[in-house]
Image (cartoon, coloured by chain):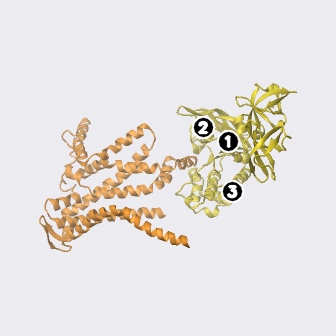
Chain colours: A orange, B yellow
Amino acid sequence: MSGSWKSRASGGWSRWSGALFVAPYLAVFILMLVVPLFIGIRLSLTHGDLFGIKSFVGVDNFTRLFADPVFLQTVWNTVRFVLLTVPAMTVIGLALALVLNYQTRWAAILRAIFFASSVLSVTVVTLIWRLVLIPEGGLAAVLAKAINLQPVAFLSEQALAMPSVALTTIWWGIGLPMVLFLAALQQVPRDLYEAAALDNASKARMLRSITLPSIRRTLALVVIVEVILQFQLFGQPQLMTGGGPNNSTRPVVLFIYETGWKQWQLGYAAAASQILFAMIAIAAMVQYFLSSRKDAA
Amino acid sequence: MTGIKLSGVSKRFGDVPVIDNLWLDIRAGEFVVFLGPSGCGKSTLLRLIAGLEAIDAGQIEVEGRRVDHLAPGARNIAMVFQQYALYPHMTVRENLAFGLRNAKVPADEIARRIEATARSLEITELLQRRPSQLSGGQRQRVAIARATVKQPALFLFDEPLSNLDAALRARTRIELAQLHQQLGTTMIFVTHDQVEAMTLADRIVVINERRIEQIGTPMEIYRRPATRFVASFVGTPRINLVAVHVTGLSGNALARLPDGATISTGVSYSSLPQANMTLGLRAESVRVADSGAGDINGTVRVVERLGDRTLVHVALSEGTLITAEDRGNSTVQTGQAVGLTVDGAAAHLFAADGTAYHGAQQ
C-alpha cells in the first residue's frame, strides 16, 4: 500500500511542477490573447471612437452589422475566398507532396523551390503577382498577346479579381501544406506499399486504401490550419485591389481595419471581429468533428 | 517439376554488388531456407524473387513461367514480412480480402476462402478486429493467413519469426512446418537463425557475402559443411577451429595441434592442398575423459550445464580453447585438469581459402 501512497504524493508534486513549466506560456497566452478577447467582446457592446468608449449600446452593433450590405458582402467574399483556396491548397499540396516524396536530388530541389514562396512577405508576393496580372505589359498580357488573345484585366474585372487574389494566395502559401503532407507521407511504412504491390493493388488503389487513410490526421490538420489562415485574408486584397472592384475582393478583416482604424468606429469594428471569430471557430469545429467522426468509424 | 529457377541473377545497389551471378533451382513443393548473417544479401534475393527490387541481369522463373519482368502482383507470389505489414486501417477480414478483390475474385469466393483460411489458422474470432487490437502472435497468424488466402504458387517469408518471443517462435515454427505439409506449396524462408533453418528446411541455401556457400539438406550442411564459413555458422555451440600442421599416416591426415598433441583424422591425406590447415571439431565429437587418459590434455575454464548435456570449455597448454561435451550429470569443475577424447573420423580440415575436406564416413 505504501506504493500507492508514494505515487499519490509524487503525483501531487508533478502536478505543481507541471504547472510551473507551462506558467510562462500561460501568462503570455492570457495577457496577449484571452484578455484582449474579452476586451474586444466588451468593446463590441459599446459605441467608441478615437477618444475612447462613449456608451454601452448592447447588441446594437451586431444588429447594424447584419443589416449592413457592405459587411454582408465582405462575409460572403471571405467565405468565397476560403472555398476557393482551402480545397485547392489541400489538393495541390497533397499532389506536390506525392510527386516530390522521393529521395532524389531533383525532388529535393523542387521541394525547396515550391516551399521558397512561403518565406516571402505579402508585399513582395502581391508585387510579383501584380506584375504578372496587370493588363499593360504584365506577364499574362504578354503571353496572351503572343497567342493573339486580348489581354485580360484580372484585377479590375469583378468576376476575375477574387480568383486572382486566391491564385496569388495559393502560390504564396502552398509550401506549408506540402511540407506537412511530406512529413506525413514519410511516416507511412514502406512495407505497406510493398505488401499492396504483392496484393496486385494499382497506384490509385494504394493512394485510396493506404496513403489517404494513413495521413488522414494530417489532412484534417491542413484543412483546419488553412481555414483559420485564409479566413484572416487581408494583405493581398489590400495591396492588390484595395478591396475592389465594387467591393468584390473586400474581406472581413479589411472591413474591420477600415471601420476601426480609418473611420474610428471601434465598437462596430470590434463587433465585426467577434463575428469573424465565430465564423472561424465554427468552421474549424465542423471540420474537427467531421474528421474525428471518421477516425472513430 | 521446377518450382523456382534463378539463372545468373545479379543485383547492384549503385556501385555495390549485392547478388552476383546466382544460380538456383528449387523443386515444386520444396521448403527452402536462405540462411546467412545480416547483410549477406539473402533478403535482397527474396525481394528480387518477389519483384520488390528489379534484377540487373539474369532471369527468374516460377513454375516454368518467366516472371522477372512482371509486376510483383502478377507473379502469383505471397510474402510474409518481418514487421507483418498488415494494413492498419482495415479489419483482419479486409486485410485478407484486399489482394483477392484486386485480383477480381468473386465476392462469394472471397468470403468462402476467408472463412476456410481463418478456420484453419484459428483466427475466426479476430476477423472483425484491426491490427492494432491484436497481439504480436495474432498479427503473425493474420500475416500468414493473408498470404495463404491468395493460394499462391510460392510463399516468401522474410524473417517472420524474429519479432516473437522464444516460446511463440518455437510454436510458430512447428505450425509453419505443418502448414507446408498441408498446402504442399513451394516456400522460401529467409533467416539468420540456424535453428529455424535446421528445423524447417528441406534444403538450406547458405549465403555469405553475396554468394551461395552451400546448398544441401540440413544434415548435409551440418555434417559435411562445404566451407569453413558454413561449418562455423551452423551448429551450436560453434565448431572448434584449431590451426594444425598436417602429415600423412597410412593414407589419412594426421593433425598436429599447437601443443604438440596429434589427432588422426578420417580425411584422405593425398587430397589436401597444403600442410598448414585448420582442424574443425564439433563439440559432440570431443568428449571429456580423465586427466591423461584422452588424446589431448587441458584445464577446464568454463562449465555450461544444459541439463541433458554439459559443455566444457577447456584450455590446452598453449592457450587454445576447445569446447567439449560431457554427460548431463557431469562432475567436472572449473580449474580441473582433464583429458579429451577426439572422434577423429568426424573431424574436418579447412584449407586457407576456406574449402572443407571431410572423412569418407561422414
The residue labelled by disc 2 is B68
Q: Are marks 3 and 1 in contact (CB under 8 Å)?
A: no
Viewer-side residue, B24 vs A38: A38
Q: Is residue B136 visible?
A: yes
Relative to B38, is A4 on the left or the right?
A: left
Residue B131 higher or lower than A12, as above or below:
above
Numbered disc total? 3
Dot 1 or dot 2: first in sequence order is 1
Q: Secondary structure at mark 1?
A: strand
Which is closer to the viewer, label 1 or label 2? 1
Instruction: Residue A252: give x, y in percent of width and height.
Output: 23, 60
Quote the CA–CA distance across marks 1 and 2.
23 Å
Quote the CA–CA distance across marks 3 and 2.
38 Å
Q: Amino acid at mark 1?
A: Leu
Viewer-side residue, A52 vs A17: A17
Furthest residue in direction left, as rendered: A51
Instruction: Residue A243: give x, y in percent of width and height.
Output: 19, 54
Dot 1: within a 10 Å radius of its alpha carbon, few (fewer than 14), some, or many (20 or more) residues?
many
For residue B50, the mark is none
The residue labelled by disc 3 is B167
Q: Secondary structure at mark 2?
A: loop
Q: Are marks 3 and 2 on the same chain?
A: yes
Determine the image quadrant of residue B11.
top right
The residue labelled by disc 1 is B35
